[in-house]
Image: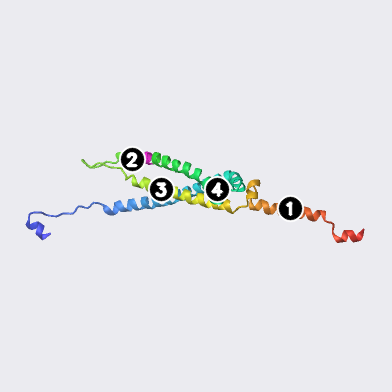
Amino acid sequence: QDALQSLGISLTFLDNNGATFWAAVDPIRRSSSVDTLIFGLLMVAGLIMTVFLYMMQHKRAYAIARALGVPSKWANNQVVLPLLLFGGFGILIGGILSWNDALSKAKTNLSTIPTPAGVTTSAELNPLFLVILCLVIFFLLAVFSWLGAQFLARQSIFDLLQGNTHRQVSEQKQAGAITISAFIPSSSTNDAG
């Protein structure tokens, strides 16, 4: 400070209300973090549901391919590839449209903020964020698709062809055992006759 004063420059610091600013910003940042977590979990749940419904819809075609002698690796690729192709296009198109919509809304909101003369607000973001976000979502879709194909590969081909689940197969086996035991005469009825 003394060196600057000897040059004729005096330093004064103005109160900028920084503490008030951070007191207002911290709850918004926490809320944004919670929103990001909730929407991220909803996205993962949506991806899981999409893959589950897709696999259940295509399990019979998978079982027919396996019954015709197609190796499980090829059958897995055949069932997963269409999901990844359509999902990739959907992620890309939805990401671009959402990105543009979010940036236009941010520009609209920022334009209403009063700023000092000569200061302009900017809502521009690096498109690399969009690319990374789309790649992460596509990676999650690929992982869930691979897990769904592995689930189908572990199922019996006959059960997949008949559309049975494990619970239905065990219930049918129990019902069959009850039906068979009803037709087998017990030894006590034979002795009485």
Secondary structure, mark 1, is helix
Q: Of the numbered discs in the image, which one, if any, rests on residue 109?
A: 2
Q: Nearer the viewer, residue 27 or 121?
A: 121
In which quadrant is the C terminus drawn? bottom right
Q: Nearer the viewer, residue 89 or 26?
A: 89
Q: Of the numbered discs in the image, which one, if any, rests on residue 147?
A: none
To which residue does mark 4 refer?
A: 75
Mark closer to the chain start, 1 or 3: 3
Mark closer to the chain start, 1 or 2: 2
Q: Marks 3 and 2, Cα distance to the nearest angstrom? A: 28 Å
Residue 102 is inside the magenta segment: yes
**Percent position of residue 190, x then y:** 89, 59
Which amino acid, mark 3? Leu
Image check: 90 left or right of 158? left
Secondary structure, mark 3, is helix
Which amino acid, mark 4? Ala
| First to last magenta residue range | 99-104
Q: Marks 1 and 3, Cα distance to the nearest angstrom? A: 49 Å
Q: Nearer the viewer, residue 80 or 96?
A: 80
Q: Nearer the viewer, residue 176 or 7?
A: 176
Mark closer to the chain start, 2 or 4: 4
To which residue does mark 1 refer?
A: 175
| Scheme of image coloration | rainbow
Q: Of the numbered discs in the image, which one, if any, rests on residue 135?
A: 3
Label 3, residues with CA under 10 Å away: few <14, some 14-19, many ≥20: some
Mark closer to the chain start, 4 or 3: 4
Which amino acid, mark 1? Ala
Label 1, residues with CA under 10 Å away: few <14, some 14-19, many ≥20: few
